Image (spheres, grey):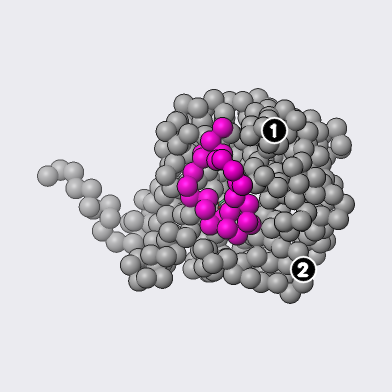
Amino acid sequence: MLSRPRRNRKNEAVRGMMRETHLGVENLIFPLFLENGQGVKSEISSMPGMYRWSTDMVIKEIEECMNLGISNFVLFPAVAEELKDKMASHSWADDNYYLDTIRKIKQALPDACLMSDVAMDPYSSDGHDGIVENGEIINDPTLEVLNRMSVAQAQAGIDILGPSDMMDGRIGSIRRAVDNAGYSNVSIMSYTAKYASAFYGPFRDALDSAPKSGDKKTYQMDPANKMEAIREAMLDEEEGADFLMVKPALCYLDVIHVLKETSTLPITAYNVSGEYAMLKAACMNGWLDYNKAMPEMLLSIRRAGADAILTYFAKDYAQLVK
Ligand code: PBG
């Protein structure tokens, strides 16, 4: 044998020198769930180790994460049922605690990079990401809602807008709205290829945001499709997105890979709630070794082509490599 690949694996020094993919804490974006109140840290039952935080508590949590090297956070609001309506109008209301929380975090920790969720579902009495009319999710009037929500978040000091709704034309529409309001420096991370996936279940428990009727298949993508992801990516690029996201991550590594090959924009991937719950459950049962399986999962997403990963594992990973 002239060629023996095992020679390049013979010890950690050689393996380290040859390693193709690296995962740093700076590549991670940590999702945090919020709820209105004070002194709240309540665990989400289907996501052990994840909590809903009140503003005062989330500031402490973010500070702790920043000391571990995490600088990027994405914030999701749980909204009281009585504040929900068909138009998600509370999303841009002056007394929306979510906007206030963004303001307070930026005040306390100006170096924390904050990303928002731009979508109607946490505020919608229908639990959908768009306006529902006679059982249909209507696209263009929804864009107006997304514009108002985005401008309100930009005013509050958000660094990156995260439209997760999958309406057509939303990136261009939001880009123009925030530019016209004087916020051309605010970035947009588009949920470019967001699939109608069963892996969002625990997230919907956390926010009580499941659709009241029907499903999300007329706007989120069919899990069978890959070419369609390229089409979405091309549109988002034209419309001014700064980053393209694939969601979920693990069942869609091929989609991450193809977008990395076809776009010049940075690619991110959302390692979603169901992927977190699945691994956590297996580890809690003693069936998998958490400190080995978790970094392997994250590394696979990087290897597929993701520049950054939104993941509930962020803090555990930062602690592990510290
Ligand atoms: C809602 C939204 C969802 C997630 C992020 N934003 C759920 C959905 O589309 O129903 C899911 C994230 C996760 O499962 O971790 N616009």
Residue 214 on the magenta span: yes
Q: Which residue was labeled with disc 2?
A: 37
Splitting the image into 4 quarters, where does residue 26 fall? bottom right
Snapshot quadrant of residue 146: top right
Measured from the top left, where is residue 125 in percent x and y? Answer: 70, 47
At 68% from the left edge and 50% from the top edge, which residue is drawn?
A: 122
Q: Is residue 162 left or right of residue 9?
A: right
* Residue 312 in view: yes
Q: Eyeballing the image, is 70 above or below 42?
A: above
In the rendered structure, the answer to whether residue 121 lies left or right of residue 176 reads left
Instruction: Say whether residue 31 is magenta.
Output: no
Q: Is residue 243 visible?
A: no
Q: Residue furthest left?
A: 1
Which residue lies under the disc numbered 1? 133
Which of the marked residues, 1 or 2, is nearer the chain's N terminus? Answer: 2
Position of residue 58 in the picture relative to residue 210 (left or right): right
What residue occupies the far front of the structure in this picture? 134
As drawn, the residue found furthest toward the bottom would be 39
Dot 1 falls on a residue whose secondary structure is strand
- Magenta residues, start to end: 194-218
Q: Is mark 2 within 8 Å of ligand 1?
A: no
- Residue 130 percent across, percent down from the top left: 68, 37
- Residue nearest the viewer, comparing 302 with 228: 228
Residue at x 67% of width, y 54% of height: 76
Which disc is residue 114 wearing? none
In front of the other: 79 or 308: 79
Secondary structure, mark 2, is loop
Of the two numbered discs 1 and 2 in the rendering, the one whose residue sits closer to the viewer:
1
Residue 46 rendering spot, x and y as whole percentages: 51, 63
Q: Position of residue 240 (x, y in %)?
A: 69, 30
Query: Would you place residue 244 above or below residue 172 in this image?
Result: below
* Amino acid at circle 1: Glu
